[in-house]
Image (tube, helix red, strand yellow):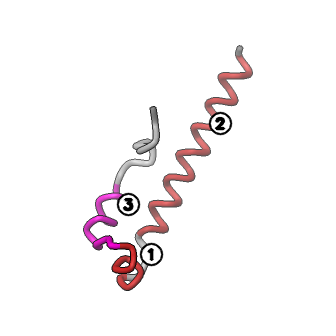
Amino acid sequence: MKGLRGVQWWARIARWYQLSQERANLRRISDAALKDLGLSRADIETESHRAFWDDPFKK
């Protein structure tokens, strides 16, 4: 049981790191690419400034 909690903790840290990196990458998307995606710079600013632990897929 103790080992499982450690694995879960590392998985959570890895997910937080992934979210942090994805949000940083969003800020680098060009305006032309955003237009192609149907997103605005304001959409990206909102999403990219969310806290790393704010996971949209967390149950």
Q: Earlier in the sequence, mark 1 or mark 3?
A: 1
Quadrant location, the C terminus: top left
Check disc 1 and report the residue beneath it: 28
Residue 33: in magenta span: no
Cα–Cα span, label 2 and label 3: 23 Å
Q: Amino acid at mark 2?
A: Trp
Residue 17's spot in the image, x, y percent? 56, 50
Q: Secondary structure at mark 3?
A: helix
Please report the bounds of the magenta region as a residue range: 38-49
Residue 43: in magenta span: yes
Helix, strand or loop for the magenta stretch, by majority: helix
Cα–Cα span, label 1 and label 3: 10 Å
Residue 14's spot in the image, x, y percent? 61, 45
Check disc 2 and report the residue beneath it: 10
Q: Secondary structure at mark 1?
A: loop
Q: Earlier in the sequence, mark 2 or mark 3?
A: 2
Q: Amino acid at mark 1?
A: Arg
Check disc 3 and report the residue beneath it: 48
Q: Secondary structure at mark 2?
A: helix
Question: Going 34% across and 66% down the picture, which residue do you hit?
Answer: 44
